[in-house]
Image (tube, rainbow, N blue to C red):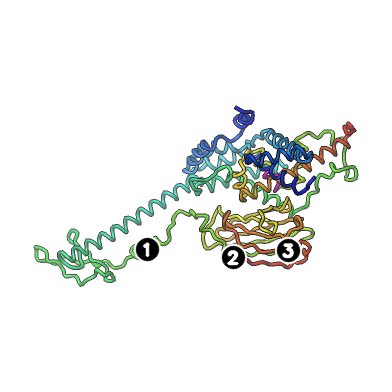
Amino acid sequence: MNRGKCAEIQRLISDGIDSTLPRDVRSRVQQHLAECAECANFEWAARKMGSRLGALPHVHGSPAVREQVLTAVYRDPSASPLHWHGWIRQGAQLAVACLAFVVVAVVLIAVVGSTGDRNRNPGSGSTGSTTFVASPTSTMAATPTPEVLEDGRERPIVVATPTQSDSQVPVIEEAVPLTPTVDAADCQATDIHVAAEAVGDDVHLHITAATNGHDCGDLATISLIITDGDGNGLVFGNGSVRSALSDELQNEFQATFLWTNWCYDDSQPVVIVNIGGPGLRVTPEVLPACSNTDALSVLTMIAP
Amino acid sequence: MTNEDTTRDLSPGRAVSSDYDAVVVDLARAGDAAAFTRLFDTHHGPITGYLLRLTGNREVADDLAQETFIRVLRALPGTDADLHFRPWLYRIATNLANSWFRRRRLRTRLPLPSFLLGSESGFDPQLADRLGEDDQIRIAFQNIGQTHTSILLLRHSQHLTLQECAEALGISPNTAKVRLYRARKAFITEYTALETSLDTSGPSGKAG
């Protein structure tokens, strides 16, 4: 029996349970199975295990849980997140519409004022019996000349100084998005601290991470992956990683990982921290070799 | 229709098609309480079963299932339209279970079921004789740890695809492949050892 080849074949057998293998790979596996009882047993056991787990009896949910959850939805609709979140969305849309209206109105007033300046009375526009002019700070501002009405009175001039709404418009525009949707690509980790601590037979990795100011919400996860150190595929800890906790704290996250079997296949372990999902991996930091577990108690890594 | 298809369609509590799920999810996201109820009723049993087999404790499974759906209720309106609901749902449940495991470990270290590992460990032949297949699976799960258990349950009992398993666990598909392989190997080793132990030590004297 070739142990290395058997490991490869058994991995292919496992892959073949989840997806279709290429024809040439399948035939290579079949050829090996005809000669290797151990791998044939593995294939039989893996398929049998899948069948057994797939046939586990259905579990009925607890009526008490159903009542609790649905009460949260129905008892006070106004307090339901489904309700108020929708309201917030509608409110946000309404706010955007109002802002757009204000911006358009200001621009129109300015344009009308400018047109009025050019056509009749530079720097002023006219509605009813009151004349509006652009703000003195505006480039359109000019010294207004009061219009003389038919009865000989001058039309009153109201100077549109920079009002609160005027000054807020660009600020609010910069504050968009009003809807807190953050693309995963925006959710970059900026400050990762990994502290390792030896506690008995366990190694505790305390990881804190901050993002670049975005509220990453549900995107935030911290996961721990152990590779074989050569970059040849990712290898999770073979059951050695015992816990992965992600606490969502807006743009700051913490996680603690515990595992007992620090060494893995005699390879050099590498820790990778993911924030926000695939593609947002922090530069790997190489941990001490398996034999050097003492160093873990004082190890502190800060990734860029 | 293949036997596998039949099982997939008729299993009680089995999630319906992803298209149907997507429509219901869209309605629930828009604030439709009836749609949320439908989502809950579709997934409540499977999620409870997943958490029960992961934690081995019905009370804990119910608590975590309730917390899972409360979180879904809060977070769903803020999700994108292209949300893959089932992997997202199982990710929430898995994270909650992981948190529970972590809290439990900090409180106490529970011993492995040593009563099954041999007479020197306090093996109880009468208990062994009463063990059913579900018990053996449960003990094997306990011995291989929740990381391997969760991916086996997601793939085989909850019928998630490899891609969905990866999404539910927050890992890449390649990592999911490797983890599945290792989980299968670990489970087979544990389960086989358990069967051998029962065969050779049980009062019925199945071993030759």
3D distance between C-alphas at marks 2 and 1: 31 Å
Instruction: Find the magenta span and give its range.
Output: B147-151
Residue B149: in magenta span: yes
The amino acid marked with disc number 1 is: Pro
Q: Main secondary structure of the magenta part?
A: helix
Which residue type does callout 2 highlight? Asp
Is residue B201 highlighted in magenta?
Answer: no
**In the drawing, does residue B122 fall left or right of residue A159?**
right
Q: Which mark is residue A170?
A: 1
Residue A75 rendering spot, x and y as whole percentages: 53, 41
Please name whichever residue, B62 or B77, is drawn nearer the observer in this view of the structure.
Answer: B77
Q: Earlier in the sequence, mark 2 or mark 1?
A: 1
Residue identified by numbered label 2: A191
Q: Residue at x 50, y 49 (%)?
A: B78
Residue drawn at (64%, 55%), measured in percent from left and top?
A223
- Mark before the other along the chain sequence, 1 or 3: 1
* Residue A167 is at least partly visible in this image: yes
Q: Residues within 10 Å of mark 3 (few under 14, many from 20)?
A: many
Q: Is residue A304 above or below residue A99?
A: below
Image check: B150 left or right of A220?
A: right
* Towards the viewer: B82 or A210: B82
Callout 1: helix, strand or loop?
helix
Question: Mark 2 vs mark 1: same chain?
Answer: yes
Which residue is painted at 84% across and 33% down in the image?
A: B129
Residue B67 visible in this rendered orientation of the protein: no
Which quadrant would the N terminus of chain A be assigned to in this image? top right
Q: Which residue is mark 3?
A: A197
| Mark with earlier residue (2, 3) | 2
Disc 3 marks a residue whose amino acid type is Glu
